[in-house]
């Protein structure tokens, strides 16, 4: 059995809640890159394709191509 061990302190994360109208969320960390493939982004636990969002370094934000539905949990990990 192979086991993957990670040091979670190497990752930054930001949590948000969708409201049906907000496309852009301020991140709680400053990304080191704007390359969407360098992030894991999930809405209610479902990983999103890098084509579904853009990352901005300044200001530190994630912008979705469509607003997450009301009450859905948004998680960005870098």
Image (spheres, rainbow, N blue to C red):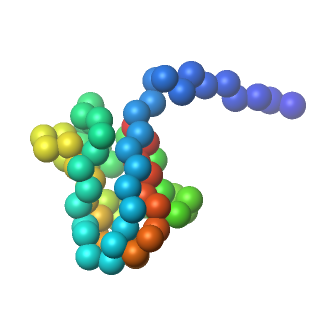
Q: Is residue 45 above or below residue 10?
A: below
Q: Is residue 62 visible?
A: yes
- Work out which quarter of the rendered image holds the N terminus and state it: top right
For image coordinates 39% across by 62% down, the residue present is: 17
Where is residue 58 drawn, in percent x and y?
A: 13, 41
Q: Is residue 41 visible?
A: no
Residue 41 percent location from the top left of the image: 43, 53
Looking at the picture, how far across and down is residue 37, in whole percent? Answer: 38, 46
Locate the C terminus and report the quarter of the image it occupies.
top left
Of the pair 20 and 78, the residue shown nearer to us: 20
Work out whether residue 17 or residue 32 is closer to the camera in this orientation and state it. Answer: 17
Using residue 24 as the reference point, say whether residue 7 is left or right of it: right
Residue at left offset 45%, top offset 30%? 11
For the point 34% across and 72% down, the residue is: 19
- Image position of 41 (left or right of 7): left
Q: Quadrant of residue 8?
A: top right
Q: Quadrant of residue 66?
A: bottom left
**Total numbered labels:** 0
Q: Position of residue 43 (x, y in %)?
A: 47, 62
Q: Is residue 76 above or below residue 63?
A: above
Q: At 29% from the left edge and 35% from the top edge, which residue is drawn?
A: 29
Q: Residue furthest right?
A: 1
């Amino acid at each position: 059995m192979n086991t993957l061990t990670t040091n979670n302190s190497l990752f930054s994360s930001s949590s948000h809640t969708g409201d049906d109208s907000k496309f852009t969320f301020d991140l709680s960390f400053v990304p080191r890159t704007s390359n969407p493939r360098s992030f894991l982004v999930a809405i209610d636990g479902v990983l999103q394709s890098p084509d579904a969002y853009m990352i901005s370094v300044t200001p530190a934000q994630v912008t979705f191509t469509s607003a997450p539905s009301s009450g859905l949990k948004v998680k960005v990990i870098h």
